[in-house]
Structures are given as C-alpha cells and as structure tokens.
Image: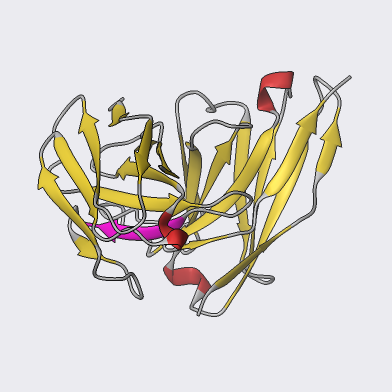
Amino acid sequence: QVQLVQSGAEVKKPGSSVKVSCKTSGGTFNSFAISWVRQAPGQGLEWMGRIIHSLNIPHFAPDFRGRVTITADKSTTTAYMELSGLRSEDTAVYYCARDEGDDSSVIFDNWGQGTLVTVTS
Amino acid sequence: EIVMTQSPATLSVSPGERATLSCRATHSVRNSLAWYQQKPGQAPRLLIFGSSTRATGVPARFSGSGSGTEFTLTITRLQSEDFAVYFCQQYNNWPITFGGGTKVEIK
C-alpha cells in the first residue's frame, strides 16, 4: 500500500515562494508518477503538474507553467512542488497524488493528506 | 483545454434513495473519465476509472457510465457515508481537468 505524507502548513507573504514535500512509502518509487493538485477554499480541484519519477521529466498545466517547479528525489522517495510569485489567490490546500506512471491513464489512486498554504501580507 | 461541467451543483437526496450525477466534457474524452469522492477535511478518494470500473474497495452501489462527452455516476440506496462532494476528472488530454463538483446532501 502506497502512502503519501506531506509537509505541514505554511504561511507566506505575497511575492514569496513555497516548497511542499510529499514523502512516499510502499510501492516502487521509480514506477509511478506524482501530480500536484490544489483546492482553494470551498472550490474544486485544479491539476498543476506531474512528474514521472523514472524519467524526472515534469508536465505542467498552462496556468502554472513558469511559476511551478516539480522535482523528485529518488534517494528519499520524496516529491517536491515549489510555487513562486505567490499571490492571495494561491491560498489553497495543495495535494500530491499518485498514478501508475502511464501517460494515457493518469488516475489518482493515492493522495497525500494535503498541505494548507496561506498567502497573506 | 477540455472543460468538465458537472450538474447539478447540489443534489438533495434522502437516505436509501438513488442519486444520479452528471459530468459533461467540451470535447470527447473517450472513456478516460474518473470519479472521486471527497468528504470535508479529507483528500479525494478514487471511486471509478475508465468511466465504469470501480476502484478497489468501492461498494457496488456506485456505478459509472458514459463515453465521449456525457458521463453519469449513479449511487443506489444512498447511505449516510455517501453524503459528500463528487468530482469527475478527464485524463484523455493534457492538461488533466476536473469538474467543479456535485455536493450530495441529505434531504
């Protein structure tokens, strides 16, 4: 059983950056992919990007390209998402979510517990 | 980008009754459609993928159907633990997109 454990809540100022981690355990790290999905308060789900661990090549949603960095550390089986140029609209719960690594079947069968990022001056 | 639209936004149902949730895509996503359930303060949980295949451990009262642009999630004999928000997600095209959600509440 794969488990995803995320880092704790963050409070950031506008214009700064935040880096959220997602520690994975169970399963074979190199065989799957991790996406980042965010959810603003009371809102729906928004996919931000994805990285396939074996290739270390990320894909991004157009709205986040250039502002988000997604990386993976195989030695610690941890994925990271860094979002820069924070603004108040980035206040949200950020989730990491796992899929099997098949580009034609991006189905999220395991999720982290979520990390609340609050952007406030 | 494929836009996913869910209806209704809120569905009021009595326990034991059936709930029918809809999800529509702006372009065909074939059968590359998943459904998730989310309860307050929790991460989403995968229910259905491939439009109609239940994920491991999902009760048989949950069923999905549809292909192309029109999809349905049906929950028969609603139980107390089924009152939640449900999201559809297409994975046929990049970027991955989700519907806005349907909240199933107790009538």
Task: Look at 41% across and 57% down and name the residue there.
Answer: B82
> For the view shown, which residue lies furthest in the right direction?
A121
Horizontal placement of A72 versus B19: left or right?
A: right
Horizontal placement of B83 versus B88: left or right?
A: right
Task: Look at 84% across and 31% down and name the residue there.
Answer: A12
Q: Is residue B96 visible?
A: no
Horizontal placement of A88 versus B11: left or right?
A: right
Asked if A37 appears above or below B8 in the picture, the reply is below
Q: Observer-nearest residue: B17 or B36?
A: B17
Answer whether residue B83 is magenta in the image.
Answer: no
Task: Look at 40% across and 36% down and name the residue there.
Answer: B101
Q: Observer-nearest residue: A44 or A53?
A: A44
Residue A78: percent from left, percent from top: 65, 63
Asked if A87 appears above or below B24 in the picture, the reply is above
Q: Looking at the rendering, in which quadrant would you find the C terminus of chain A?
A: top right
Residue B48: percent from left, percent from top: 28, 58
Q: How many marks?
A: 0
Horizontal placement of B72 versus A19: left or right?
A: left
Q: Observer-nearest residue: B14 or A37?
A: B14
Colour scheme employed for the rendering of this structure: secondary structure
**Magenta stretch secondary structure, dominant:** strand
Q: Quadrant of residue B45?
A: bottom left
Q: Is residue B20 visible?
A: yes
Residue A28: percent from left, percent from top: 49, 77
Task: Look at 39% across and 45% down and name the residue there.
Answer: B86
Q: What range is drawn magenta here?
A: B45-49
Residue A13: percent from left, percent from top: 86, 25
